[in-house]
Image: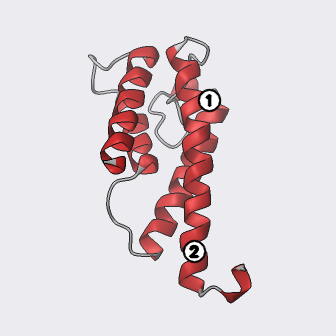
């Protein structure tokens, strides 16, 4: 079936599959962070402003950031420009690692906010 699809259609199908996998992985990681089982969630190498934590960033978050960047790249290639789960996640990582914000939320609260935003986003798309 894939062989009869155009390059653009193949990219859209790949994007759909990547976004499904990403959403599932992100949901599991977010729930773990809410349950205080993922204390370094959101601490990604790409956004880490703290030198003393260099090399001690969260592997799951780093993997999710890489996947999110891949998804956003493909979305741009196929002409999708609206916000998506991947871009929302990256904005939460960036907010969490903003060293200039002394009032930023802790991991659990930040994860709960992300979870709520993703749920609201999903509901809005299904309406």
**Residue at the spot 53% in from the left edge and 82% down from the top edge:** 8
Q: Quadrant of residue 120?
A: top left
Q: Position of residue 11 (x, y in %)?
A: 57, 74
Q: Position of residue 14 (x, y in %)?
A: 61, 67
- Identify the image quadrant of the N terminus: bottom right
Q: Secondary structure at mark 2?
A: helix
Instruction: Judge whether residue 40 can be spotted in this image.
Output: no
Q: Quadrant of residue 65?
A: top right
Q: What coloring was used for the rendering? A: secondary structure
What crowding class fits label 1: few (fewer than 14 Cα within 10 Å), some (14-19), or many (20 or more)? Answer: some
**Residue at the spot 55% in from the left edge and 11% down from the top edge:** 36
- Above or below 64: residue 96: above
**Residue 12: mark:** none
Residue tagged 1 = 58
| Viewer-nearest residue: 119 or 109 | 119
Q: Position of residue 64 (x, y in %)?
A: 58, 43
Direction from residue 47 to residue 64 in the image, left or right: right
- Above or below 37: residue 21: below
Between tags 2 and 1, which lies in front?
2
**Residue at the spot 44% in from the left edge and 24% down from the top edge:** 111
| Viewer-nearest residue: 124 or 7 | 124
Instruction: Judge whether residue 39 can be spotted in this image.
Output: yes
């Amino acid at each position: 079936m894939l062989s009869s699809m155009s390059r653009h259609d193949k990219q859209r199908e790949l994007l759909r599959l990547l976004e499904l996998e990403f959403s599932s992985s992100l949901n599991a990681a977010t729930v773990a962070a809410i349950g205080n089982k993922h204390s370094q969630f959101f601490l990604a190498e790409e956004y880490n402003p703290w030198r003393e934590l260099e090399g001690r960033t969260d592997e799951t978050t780093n993997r999710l950031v890489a996947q999110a960047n891949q998804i956003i790249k493909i979305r741009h290639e196929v002409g999708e420009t609206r916000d998506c789960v991947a871009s929302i996640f990256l904005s939460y990582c960036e907010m969490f690692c903003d060293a200039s914000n002394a009032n930023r939320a802790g991991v659990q609260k930040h994860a709960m906010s992300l979870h709520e935003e993703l749920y609201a986003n999903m509901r809005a798309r299904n309406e």
